[in-house]
Image (tube, helix red, strand yellow):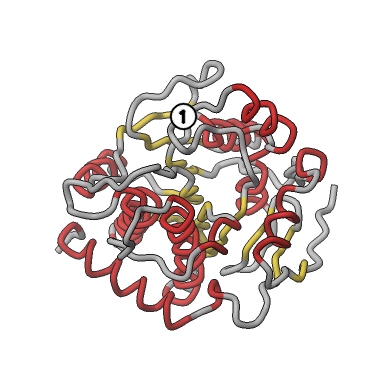
Amino acid sequence: MTLDMTPYRASRLMPVRMMTCMYRQQSRTIACPDLPRLDGKTVLVTGGASGVGEFISRGALERGATVISMSRGISEATGALADVQQIKCDLADLASVRNAVDQLAVRKIDILFCNAGIALREHKMTTDNIEMTYAVNVLGHHLLYRLLQERDLFNDEPRIIMTSGDAYVAAENCEANPKLKKFSTPKVYGGTKLGNLWQALELSRHYPSIRAIAIHPGAIMSGLGGSTPTGIVHWLLSKIAISVEQGAQASLIAATQDLPSGSYWHNVCRLMELPEGDVALDTQKSSKLWEELEYLVDPWLSQ
């Protein structure tokens, strides 16, 4: 199986983007080919034992990789994941992230899947005085890959896969403490997905040896918002949303296929060519985010 790498020209209009994302995605989601394999490689998956992360782990195991999962609790998967090493890591707590990396000792990582994420319905702050959605989806992952880089725990030519998504079109910026009169899940969560796109862009600029790729996994029945839909809402989603196994395919494609660093892979549209003026291409804002992240994690990096 050979993937079509022809870039897909994304629309400027939010309704068109969202319709393109959702329309028949259950049948249009692109599956990851069996080849190339990942024999001899070690992959690290945040949230790698439940939800989409479980099937990223399973896909990597099937391709011969050694898999390590970092998650807030020891998660229960849909079946045995005895071959996955689990390390406790709360991405909302920077001390926990550093402690988790300490437990890796000298284990070197070939592929980092920045998969874990949350979408809260109300404003919540972390003990580090950071808005929770930003802390988990953006800041915690930044400290994780910066510690791996600083401690020389990446193997040669590593990959970092950032889970983003077209939810970013609802936002204009990504801030540690968004200045909103009223908490808005689309704007706050969308802002973090925009931040994930900017992280991939900035990683490719700051570390040319790292292949950083952002992905849109699809609209998934995963309970990301902290609750399980019921009734008519569940029925509607069952007709539109994809399974968590399908949601893992974009990450596996980014980990195994020859995608350019800094690119954006979409579960149904393949390589996305974003239109001129798209906020995801704003290098001034992406650079500002990188500077903010570096400032926030500086106390937690080794001196």
Left or right side of 213 for 74 = left
Which of the two residues, 169 or 109, is positioned nearer the viewer here? 169
Using the rendered view, name the quadrant where residue 64 is placed: top right
Left or right side of 145 for 81 = right
Which of the two residues, 69 or 119, is positioned nearer the viewer here? 119
Which of the two residues, 41 or 87, is positioned nearer the viewer here? 87
Residue farthest top in this picture: 80
User: Residue, x 65% and y 37% (percent of image)?
Assistant: 63
**As shown in the figure, which amino acid type bears the numbered disc 1?**
Ser
Left or right side of 253 for 65 = left
Residue 236 versus residue 273 in the image, above or below = above
User: Would you say residue 186 is visible in this rendering?
Assistant: yes
Using the rendered view, name the quadrant where residue 243 is placed: top right
Residue 163 spot, x, y in % from top left: 53, 52
User: Residue, x 66% and y 33% (percent of image)?
Assistant: 237
User: Residue, x 42% and y 43% (percent of image)?
Assistant: 118
Which of the two residues, 229 or 282, is positioned nearer the viewer here? 229
Residue 234 versus residue 282 in the image, above or below = above
Q: How many marks?
A: 1
Residue 37 versus residue 208 in the image, above or below = above
Residue 258 spot, x, y in % from top left: 69, 61
Q: Which residue is mark 1?
A: 227
Q: Quadrant of the C terminus?
A: bottom left
User: Would you say residue 152 is visible in this rendering?
Assistant: no
Residue 144 spot, x, y in % from top left: 33, 52
Residue 148 spot, x, y in % from top left: 34, 55
Residue farthest front in this picture: 181
Circle 1 Cα neighbour tier, 10 Å, few/some/many (<14 / 14–19 / ≥20): few
Residue 181 versus residue 228 in the image, above or below = below
SS of the residue at dot 1? loop
